[in-house]
Image (cartoon, rainbow, N blue to C red):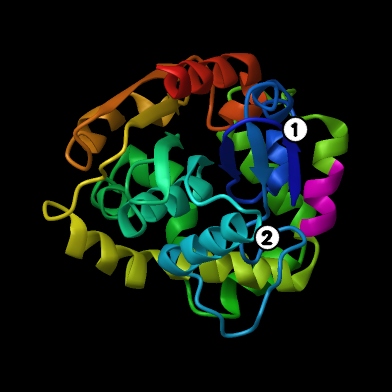
Amino acid sequence: MLVGGGGPPLLLLHGYPQTHVCWHKVAPILAQRWTVVCPDLRGYGESVKPQGADYSKRAMAVDQIETMTALGFEQFAVAGHDRGGRVAYRLALDHPERVSHLAVLDIIPTIDNFERLNGRAALGGYHWLFLAQPAPFPERLIGADPDFFLDHCLQSWAGRSDVFDPEAMAEYHRCFRDPATIHATCEDYRANPTIDYETDEADRGRRMIGCPVLVLWGAARPQRSDFTPLDTWQRWASNVRGRGLPCGHFLPEELAEETAAEVERFLLA
């Protein structure tokens, strides 16, 4: 975990198959105004990877509550990309008194994502079904060549193949080669169709996110012609704004300055 800067606290949560390093371009910009906290999610990077642990977004949100409490922050803003965005919106739903602002990058809620996984969307989201298969099926296949699988994910989801810093890539490879990481991150996805779906189903239409919400997404991916996340998020929160950016999935690395500027404007509004 990295902590830096000064000012109000801002929690930045990464996604699959990365680590907190994905914020290496954005965090220094935001740290000029905020105290930026960049942890590794449960099961990722240097975090603990307990066998048989609960990898639901509800449990992972509690991890972040405990982290911010230990740092002395009772209320904070949170921005999450990919899996981190799922933890972030669960934080805002389950612990509304702790979250002042929520930014979600390139996601819609889990239940809504499952409902749109058909046709072309299913081709882009195949990993939701593959990684959720019972152990050890995906673990064995990924573990045969983890570098290849990680590179395939990053390159096929990005808008351009040259956006990733070599040092960041080396860190992603180092962490993802650990069999415990491969298993833990599959467990993260196994929680999608079970407890994560069930908690979303219990909340959708019944509980709303109370804080302001910023929605950013990569609008340049071929499968995104019918992707309208603002429409979806407006059913989950009353104060929603955002826009698509001309990039692929990895906004913090593909368009770091633009992503940081959008988050800054949102937090200062």
What residue is pinned by disc 2? 44
Mark 1: give few (<14), some (14-19) or many (20+) Cα within 10 Å: some
Where does the image place residue 94, in percent across and percent down from the top left?
Answer: 33, 60
Quick one: 216 or 66, which is closer to the camera? 66
In depth, the one of 222 and 64 nearer the eye is 64
The segment highlighted magenta reads 170-175
Q: Which residue is mark 1?
A: 24
Q: Position of residue 74 (x, y in %)?
A: 50, 52
Label 2 vs 1, first from the N-terminus: 1
Check if mark 2's residue and mark 1's residue have beta carbons within 8 Å: no
Magenta-drawn stretch contains 174: yes
Front one among 217 and 162:
217
Three-letter code for the amino acid on which mark 1 is drawn = His
Identify the residue at horizontal 81%, vertical 38% (top origin): 168
Magenta stretch secondary structure, dominant: helix
Residue 174 percent location from the top left of the image: 85, 55
Quadrant assignment for the C terminus:
top left
